[in-house]
Image (spheres, rainbow, N blue to C red):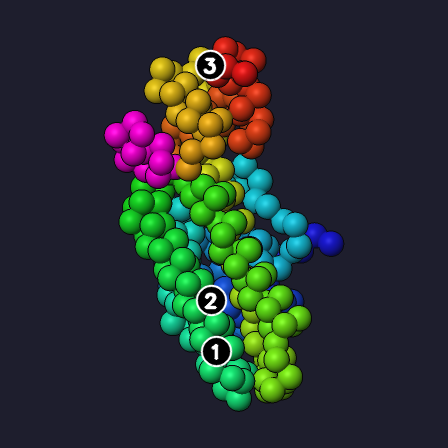
Amino acid sequence: MKNDFSITMKMGDLLDRDPSLLGVFTRMGFNYGYGDASVETVCKASGTDPATFLMICRVYSQEGYRPSKEEIQAADLSVIVRYLSLSHDYYTNVALEDLAGGLDRTIGTCPEEVQRVFWKFFSDFKAELMKHFDYEEKFVFPFAGHAGTGVSEEDHSGVEETLEDLKSLVMNHLPASADQREAFKVLSGIHFLSDDIKKHIILEETALEGRLEDTGGAGELSAREKEILVCVAKGLLNKEIADELNISIHTVITHRKNITHKTGIKTVAGLTVYALINGLLDI
């Protein structure tokens, strides 16, 4: 059902709609104690564009919602970038710390070898997530609004898949000696974190990348784009392409987005077929 959010409604009524909006409110840097103030009043008091705030709220509260091109073009990009950056802080300093504490209490009574396995998995996941965040902070957010900015789907997929694996390990393979009450809390935390990160990804991919759709243009692929297309069709990852062609990863991502925009094809399989049809790659 479509949300009827408006800037004139009371902030309290908005936050009552969905518990996830409390997290959005906090990460926007707003303070509680707003009384009967409207969404517009609370937003303007903190220098935040209210329409952009409501767009973010819709992403989190409405299943399957993706901002329209018109909403994205009208949004305040600085508000979105600030929110995404504050979300990184939340994941790092709150969500992961809570998850680690719950996991510690869950497996604390398990054999040491079991504990080592779980902690190795968790520490690897945390390191991957930190690497992902660091990349976005250095190469995505500073260039938001410029052609080619964005995060590739391969960067996102690993984070989501690892969370699913952690959930499966706790749910299906936890030893009987584990604390079952704490396991329930851990599973609840994983479910919330997974859902929150999915919404975070939607916001990144639609708001940051969607704004760029009109900056390119359909047309002939450049010589460099054809080179990169062939590398993609051969199964090379962004870093491998960068090393192969002696260019930066950011440049590779820029060209890949131009390729997708010009061809209208997003998947590696589809781009491979395109390369074959156009004689860029031998069967």
Dot placed on the residue nearer the N-terminal end, 2 or 3: 2
Quarter of the rendering containing residue 130: bottom left
Give the residue displayed 51% in from the left and 18% down from the top. 275
Disc nearest the viewer among 1 and 3: 1
Dot placed on the residue nearer the N-terminal end, 1 or 3: 1
Which numbered disc covers residue 121?
Answer: 2
Residue 222 position within the rendered picture, expressed as x and y whole percent measured from the top left: 38, 16
Q: Which residue is mark 3?
A: 280
In the shown orientation, is residue 246 left or right of residue 163? left
In the shown orientation, is residue 238 left or right of residue 56? left
269 above or below 150? above
**Residue 90 visible in the picture:** no
Q: Quadrant of the N terminus?
A: bottom right
Give the residue displayed 50% in from the left and 11% down from the top. 279
Q: Which residue is mark 1?
A: 113
Is label 1 in a helix, a strand or a loop? helix
Q: CA distance from mark 2 to mark 3?
A: 41 Å
- Which range of residues does the magenta coloring cover? 238-249
Considering every residue shown, the one lying at the far top of the view is 279
Disc nearest the viewer among 2 and 1: 1
Residue 86 position within the rendered picture, expressed as x and y whole percent measured from the top left: 38, 62
- Secondary structure predominantly adopted by residues drawn in magenta: helix
